[in-house]
Amino acid sequence: MTQAPPLRLARRAERIEPFYVMEIFKAAQQLQARLPAGADPLIYLNIGEPDFTAPPLVAEAAARCIRDGNTQYTQSNGLPLLRERISQWYAQRFGVDMDPGRIVITAGASAALQVACLALIQQGDEILMPDPSYPSNRHFVSLAEGTPKLIPSGAAERFQLSAAKVAEHWGEHTRGVMLATPSNPTGTSIAPEELRAIHQFVRSKGGVTIVDEIYLGLSYDEAYSHSALALGEDVISINSFSKYFSMTGWRLGWVVLPPVLAKTVELLSQHLFICPSTVAQHAAVACFAPESIALYEQRRAEFQARRDWFVPQLNALGLQVPVMPDGAFYAWADCSSWFERLGVDNSWDATFALMEKAQLVVTPGRDFGVADTSRFIRFSTANALPQLQEAVERLKRLP
């Protein structure tokens, strides 16, 4: 039989790097299968997924939706009632009033970022973002034929972009900025006055400000607990039901847009996704019931308690967290002082050494950029406190 010629990949596909957190997860699963009977199971502090699941009212709403056969397509921009509830939440939680018509419900925050990039970025456009930052964000820019420009951002800047750096790196082809506050992998936020200065500069250049706010609900410091949407209707904000609302596998998010852009993004969504999951949307309406919000706030306090215990433990072990995370559930730790102890010279190899020697799974810095990330690993504290305590004990027992 004649062998078929190899398929030609599109150049955009060739530019996509692995999502290393998932590659590490696969390696951990393979190691788990090789462990002898009775061995300590692996502790997974690598994936950013809350250990909490949807509250009872949300689960009940989903079951009722299925039972009643209410499972057909919705409008492409989402259920009107859900968009109204989100609008009310912004007003109550962040003091931001907005027309629900600016909100488009999406199949997760990833879909929100995708349609925003497709609507705004064209070939040759540069988008500035901090290094380190969430890996998929730069790939969404690439898939829209743009160029992500990662700017080294260190501890002195809370691992975030500053207005000065945005001005320094703004060039002829720069289209805008993509920020995340609080950030994955660092859990740090941009100070409101700095965010305002960034946006004012971008606005003066006729650019776009895209802000990933999926961890904003999990903010622990009032100084940073402000939505970028307060800066004006020209800010584009991405959000999600995955983190604060504990609905990761439901794949539901939203994007808040300038009024003139909402219809364009709705049209893109019609063709790309038709609509988000109907069941997930009906269930998500129950997220905003007072009983659900009270539970979410209890969980936020629990995430903060985990951070307050875990980060000092890492610091005491020499796994220094240069900036205390003010949100999310991550610790961005400099592990370079452990390289000799682990017999490695970078955080990628340190990740595998910790997996083999301590049965502890973390995420290497290379997932999040190239500027100094070879010294860092990311711990996820989206895990019960006893698991975090056991992880620390295993670290202490390493020779």
Image: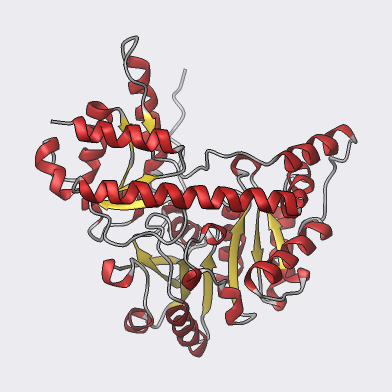
Q: Position of residue 317 (x, y in %)?
A: 20, 45
Residue depicted at x 45% and y 85%: 197
Give the side of residue 22 with respect to residue 236, left or right.
Answer: left
Residue depicted at x 74% and y 54%: 290
Residue depicted at x 76% and y 49%: 286
User: Is the residue 59 above or below the residue 376 in the image?
Assistant: above
- Nearer-the-camera pick, 369 or 310: 310
User: Is the residue 80 above or below the residue 22 in the image?
Assistant: below
Give the side of residue 339 with respect to residue 163, left or right.
Answer: left
- Name the image quarter holding the C terminus: top left
Any part of residue 154 in sight? no
Q: How is the image coloured?
A: secondary structure
Total marks shown come to 0
User: Is the residue 4 above or below the residue 92 in the image?
Assistant: above
- Nearer-the-camera pick, 72 or 120: 72
Residue depicted at x 27% and y 71%: 156
